[in-house]
Amino acid sequence: MGVRKESIPDIETKEQYQQYQKDVAAFIEREGLSFLSTGTDSVPEDDGGNVDPWFSGRPCECCGCTLGGNREYLFACNQANEIVQFEICEDCVYFVNYDTLYDSTMIRIVNKKS
């Protein structure tokens, strides 16, 4: 897993967004992932599962963001045809599901003067 050593900034420019896209694509390629799905544990909370997003100070395993925040699981199939699991930030959850970031972030990027 290649995790970024420095914090990524709040994405405000087209250049930062393009770098974010490259970082996520590089993670998926490096890990050899397909059939990506996001969510929380199916294990009940009473049995130790994470049924809701949870706060973590650990880096996002997808984009490498070192800022603390809510995390969810990314489940995927690797090249050995095994189901693997990663802890990813909410930006990556949204990006994996919709191939874009939140509307408010995208509006800020589009409206940002270079």
Image (cartoon, rainbow, N blue to C red):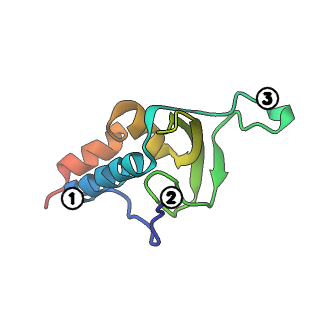
Residue 103 at what x, y percent from top left?
A: 33, 37
Query: Which mark's residue is nearer the viewer, 2 or 1?
Result: 2
Amino acid type of the residue tagged 1 in the rendering: Glu
Q: Are the residues at dot 3 and dot 2 in contact (C-beta closer than 8 Å)?
A: no
Circle on res. 54:
none
Q: Residues within 10 Å of mark 3 (few under 14, many from 20)?
A: few
Q: Residue at x 63, y 40 (%)?
A: 53
Q: CA distance from mark 3 to mark 2?
A: 28 Å
39 over 20 or under it: above or below: above
Q: For residue 91, what is the image quadrant?
A: top left
Give the residue pinned by disc 3: 44
Mark 2 or mark 3, which is nearer the start of the sequence? 2
Amino acid type of the residue tagged 2 in the rendering: Met
Mark 3 or mark 1, which is nearer the start of the sequence? 1
Give the residue pinned by disc 2: 1
Tell me: 84 left or right of 9. right
Specify the quadrant that holds the C terminus. Answer: bottom left
Give the residue pinned by disc 1: 15
Q: Nearer the viewer, residue 103 or 39?
A: 39
Amino acid type of the residue tagged 3 in the rendering: Pro
Mark 1 or mark 2, which is nearer the start of the sequence? 2
Residue 20 at what x, y percent from top left?
A: 33, 54
Residue 113 at what x, y percent from top left?
A: 14, 58
Q: Nearer the viewer, residue 37 or 91?
A: 37
